[in-house]
Image: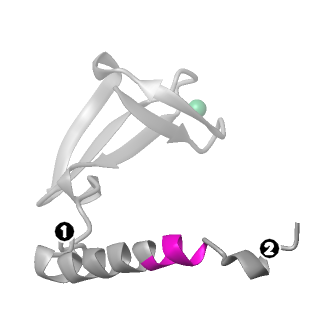
Amino acid sequence: MFVVYCAVCERRTLLGVDEVDWVENLTRGMISVSGRCPQGHDVVVLTGDAFTPHEDPRYFGPAPRVWTKPVARLRGWLRGRFELSRDLPGPFYRF
Ligand SMILES: [Zn+2]
């Protein structure tokens, strides 16, 4: 099934496999599927590998442990210091 948009009806409809008139390979990774909306208007949907979302090539995966280990150690060190500094000495308590 394909979701197609009919410009005449100005709505999206489902195009069943049995309602497909033509399937054509336009170029590598680009397929044109032609059919008719329920009102009989011609609709075309472009599909194929060129329209399939792929993983972002700019994402290189999680940061290597060589980078994260010192940051985790620093975070633990700061957490320890922060916990200690929350205990105020007696003279600072007013009530
Ligand atoms: Zn239509």
Secondary structure mainly formed by the magenta segment: helix
Q: Position of residue 55 (x, y in %)?
A: 23, 61
Q: Residue at x 80, y 73 (%)?
A: 93
What range of the chain is rendered magenta? 81-86
Q: Quadrant of residue 18?
A: top left
Does the stretch in magenta take in 33?
no
Q: Secondary structure at mark 1?
A: loop
Q: In this figure, which residue is indicated by the disc labeled 1?
A: 61
Q: Residue at x 33, y 49 (%)?
A: 46
User: Ligand 1 closer than 8 Å to the CB at disc 2?
Assistant: no
Q: In this figure, which residue is indicated by the disc labeled 2?
A: 93
Color style of the picture: one colour
The quarter of the rendered structure image containing the N terminus is top left
Front-lying residue, 33 or 73: 73
- Label 2 and label 1: CA atoms lie apart by 49 Å
Front-lying residue, 40 or 45: 45
Q: Which label's residue is closer to the chain start, 2 or 1?
A: 1
